[in-house]
Image: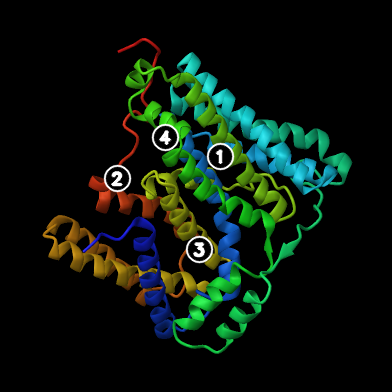
C-alpha cells in the first residue's frame, strides 16, 4: 500500500480534528468554535503569524536565525499605516515591504558580513524597530490627526465574497447538520467578506514551498543552511544566498505587520504586534521548518487567539478537545512502545480534562502563553522527527573549515 503524501495526511488529520471539535461542541454547548465569525476571525489572526513564520523559515533555511522578526513587524505596522493613510493601502503595503527589506539587509549585514551573534543582532533589531516607530510617531502622526501612539483611522479595506459558494455554504451551515454544517461554517468564514490581502498572503505558502524545494535557487538557499562550506566549494555564494533569504524574511515579516495595521484594525497602535514576531518564530519550530507546517501552527495559534475575544467558554472547550487528542496520542504511543512519551501525553490529557471540568474560563495569560506551550509539547513528543537546518544559527566565515 502506498504511503499517503503529506497534503493528504494533513487533510485527513484536519478532518479528524474537526470531527473531535464537532463532538466537543455537542458535549460542552460551545457554539462559537466552528462558527462563521470564528472562522473569519481566525483567518485575520492567522495571516500576521503566517507571514512572520514564513519570514523565519526563509531565514533559518539559509542558516541565519532571525529573532528580529518582531522588530521587522513593528516597522511594517508603522510604515503600512502611515503611507496607507496618505497614499492608499497598496502603497502602504509596498512601503512596509521596503522597510522590511532594509531591516533584513541590516540583519544580514550584521550576522553574515560582520559576524555578530545572530541572537544579539535580532534583539538589537527588535529594539531599533520599536525605537524608530516611537520616534516617527512623535513627529509624523500628530499632524495627521493622531497622537504619539495611535495613528488616524485608515480607510477600510474592501472585502470580497466568492460568488454563489459563500451563500451556499452559509445556508448549509444554518441547517445544523452534525459535522457537515461545521465544515460549511468554516469554509463560509474564509470565503465571505474577506480582504484580497488575505488570499494574496496565503499564496506565499505554496510559493515558498515551490521556490525552496523545487527551484535551483531554493536548493542553493537550503544548501547554504545545511552545509555552507560544501556549498562554497561547489561555487555557491553562501553570503549572497543568506543576504537574499534574510532580506525576503524581513519583507514577509513587515508585510505581516502591515496586515495588522491596514487590514485587521485599520489603525496603527503602539505595541500592536504584541509579540507576534516571536510566535511566528515558534510556528517555524512547530511546523518542522516546512511551509505547510508553519501554516498549521499559524492557524492553531490564530484560532486560539480568535476564540479568546469571542466566547469565554470556547477556549475551555478547545482545551477539552486537546485532552481528547492527547488521549488518542497516548494510545498511539503505547502501541508503538514509546512508554515515556505515552506517560507525558497521558499527563497532558488528564491536565486538559481537569481544566475543562474545573474552570469556566481560561485566564488570558494562559492563552497568551499557549503558543510557547504548544511548541514545547511538540519538542517533547516529536523531537526525534524535527529536522532543523544543520547549520542554522552557527557562525560561518568564508574560507573557514
* Residue at screen point 63% across, 43% down: 255
Q: Is residue 330 left or right of residue 156?
A: left
Q: Does 170 sit above or below residue 397?
A: below
Mark number displayed over residue 386? 2
207 or 242, nearer to the observer? 207
* Residue at screen point 52% across, 40% down: 55
Label whose residue precedes the other's in the sequence (1 or 4): 4
Assign a secondary structure to mark 4. helix
Percent x, y for residue 161?
A: 69, 69
* Residue at screen point 36% across, 22% down: 231
Gap in angstroms between the C-alphas marked 4 and 3: 27 Å
Gap in angstroms between the C-alphas marked 3 and 2: 24 Å
**Mark closer to the observer (2, 1):** 2
Label whose residue precedes the other's in the sequence (2 or 1): 1
Percent x, y for residue 152?
A: 82, 49
Q: Is residue 81 left or right of residue 237?
A: right
Q: From this viewpoint, is residue 319 visible?
A: yes
Label whose residue precedes the other's in the sequence (4 or 2): 4
* Residue 149: quadrant of the picture: top right
* Residue 91: quadrant of the picture: top right
Q: Which residue is mark 3?
A: 303
Gap in angstroms between the C-alphas marked 2 and 1: 24 Å
Q: How many other residues sit within 10 Å of disc 4, few (<14), some (14-19) or many (≥20)?
A: many
Assign a secondary structure to mark 1. helix
Gap in angstroms between the C-alphas marked 1 and 4: 19 Å
47 or 215, nearer to the observer? 215
Q: How many other residues sit within 10 Å of disc 2, few (<14), some (14-19) or many (≥20)?
A: some
Percent x, y for residue 21?
A: 41, 75
Q: Which residue is mark 4?
A: 61
Amino acid at each position: 500500500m502506498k504511503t499517503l503524501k503529506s497534503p493528504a495526511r494533513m487533510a485527513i488529520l484536519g478532518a479528524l480534528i474537526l470531527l473531535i471539535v464537532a463532538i466537543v461542541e455537542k458535549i460542552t454547548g460551545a457554539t462559537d468554535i466552528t462558527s462563521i465569525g470564528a472562522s473569519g476571525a481566525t483567518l485575520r489572526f492567522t495571516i500576521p503569524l503566517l507571514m512572520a513564520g514564513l519570514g523565519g523559515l526563509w531565514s533559518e533555511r539559509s542558516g541565519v536565525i532571525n529573532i528580529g522578526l518582531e522588530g521587522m513587524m513593528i516597522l511594517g505596522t508603522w510604515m503600512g499605516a502611515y503611507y496607507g493613510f496618505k497614499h492608499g493601502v497598496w502603497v502602504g503595503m509596498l512601503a512596509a515591504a521596503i522597510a522590511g527589506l532594509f531591516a533584513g539587509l541590516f540583519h544580514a549585514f550584521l550576522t553574515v558580513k560582520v559576524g555578530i551573534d545572530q541572537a544579539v543582532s535580532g534583539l538589537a533589531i527588535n529594539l531599533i524597530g520599536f525605537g524608530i516607530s516611537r520616534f516617527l510617531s512623535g513627529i509624523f502622526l500628530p499632524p495627521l490627526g493622531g497622537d504619539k501612539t495611535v495613528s488616524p483611522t485608515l480607510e477600510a479595506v474592501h472585502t470580497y465574497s466568492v460568488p454563489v459558494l459563500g451563500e451556499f455554504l452559509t445556508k448549509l451551515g444554518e441547517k445544523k447538520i452534525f459535522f457537515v454544517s461545521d465544515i460549511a461554517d468554516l469554509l463560509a468564514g474564509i470565503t465571505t467578506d474577506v480582504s484580497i490581502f488575505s488570499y494574496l498572503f496565503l499564496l506565499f505558502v505554496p510559493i515558498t514551498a515551490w521556490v525552496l524545494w523545487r527551484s535551483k535557487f531554493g536548493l542553493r538557499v537550503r544548501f547554504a543552511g545545511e552545509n555552507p562550506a560544501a556549498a562554497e566549494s561547489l561555487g555557491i555564494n553562501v553570503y549572497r544566498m543568506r543576504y537574499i533569504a534574510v532580506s525576503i524574511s524581513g519583507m514577509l515579516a513587515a508585510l505581516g505587520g502591515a496586515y495588522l495595521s491596514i487590514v485587521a484594525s485599520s489603525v496603527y497602535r503602539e505595541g500592536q504586534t504584541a509579540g507576534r514576531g516571536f510566535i511566528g518564530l515558534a510556528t517555524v519550530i512547530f511546523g518542522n521548518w516546512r511551509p505547510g507546517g508553519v501554516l498549521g501552527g499559524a492557524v492553531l495559534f490564530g484560532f486560539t487567539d480568535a476564540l479568546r475575544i469571542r466566547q469565554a467558554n470556547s477556549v475551555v472547550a478547545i482545551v477539552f478537545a486537546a485532552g481528547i487528542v492527547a488521549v488518542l496520542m497516548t494510545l498511539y504511543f503505547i502501541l508503538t512502545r514509546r512508554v515515556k512519551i505515552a506517560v507525558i501525553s497521558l499527563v497532558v490529557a488528564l491536565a486538559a480534562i481537569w481544566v475543562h471540568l474545573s474552570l469556566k474560563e481560561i485566564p488570558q495569560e494562559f492563552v497568551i502563553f499557549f503558543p510557547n506551550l504548544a511548541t514545547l509539547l511538540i519538542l517533547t513528543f516529536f523531537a526525534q522527527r524535527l529536522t532543523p537546518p544543520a547549520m542554522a544559527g552557527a557562525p560561518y566565515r568564508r574560507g573557514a573549515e
